[in-house]
Amino acid sequence: MMKEMIRKQVWLLTFMLAFGCSPVVLSACSNEDRPAAHDNVSAISDKVWEFAKSHPDGFTLHITTMTEPTEGIAVSYAATQNSHSRDQLGKVVRHALKHDCYVGGWLNTDNGLYYFDSTRLFPEDQLDEALKFGRENGQYSVFILSSGVEVPVE
């Protein structure tokens, strides 16, 4: 699995360099402030917005590679809750770039609003840790990507 991920990242970097794309987008996500990456917030937000249009039921997206993870437990950060519009998406992307580089989106059928959140991804064998993080961040549930199961935080 790790070799496959490295192979994909090397391929993506090679592709981007060959076609003149900025490798800044591939910068590692961390708690450090990376001004060059922040210059790309609007461009990344545009890509996430377009992605959301074709995924109305929801998604989790790694925003530097624009890939969807197929496993893990997605848990949203409280700091980006209640972000619904394209204008608010910049805040979500900025937060994700400083943390884990994942953005999640989902449609709330009760109120018709599409929600965007900066998301943390836990390994699937760390459900207890994911639930604890969810409680700490005021979440109602966490989402297991491989099975599509929503688990209440309670």
Image: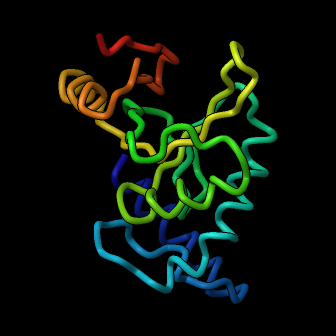
Left-right relation of 121 to 68? left
Where residue 18 appears, as percent x and y from the top left, is 67, 87
Left-right relation of 154 to 139? left
Image mark count: 0
Left-right relation of 94 to 48? left
Asked if 13 appears above or below 144 in the picture, the reply is below
Instruction: Look at the image and tell me whether residue 142 can be seen.
Output: yes
Quadrant including the C terminus: top left
Asked if 151 appears above or below 45 in the picture, the reply is above
Instruction: Look at the image and tell me whether residue 125 can be seen.
Output: no
Determine the residue positioned at 63% across, 30% down. 106
Left-right relation of 137 to 26? left
Where residue 42 appears, as percent x and y from the top left, is 67, 70
Asked if 139 appears above or below 34 in the picture, the reply is above
Colouring method of the image? rainbow
Determine the residue positioned at 31% across, 34% down. 137
Determine the residue positioned at 43% across, 53% down. 4
Q: Quadrant of residue 60?
A: top right
Determine the residue positioned at 70% across, 89% down. 20
Q: For this rendering, which residue is in front, 50 or 79?
A: 79
Where residue 72 appears, as percent x and y from the top left, is 38, 33
Q: For this rendering, which residue is in front, 22 or 82?
A: 82
Q: Quadrant of residue 34?
A: bottom left
Where residue 108 appears, as percent x and y from the top left, is 66, 21
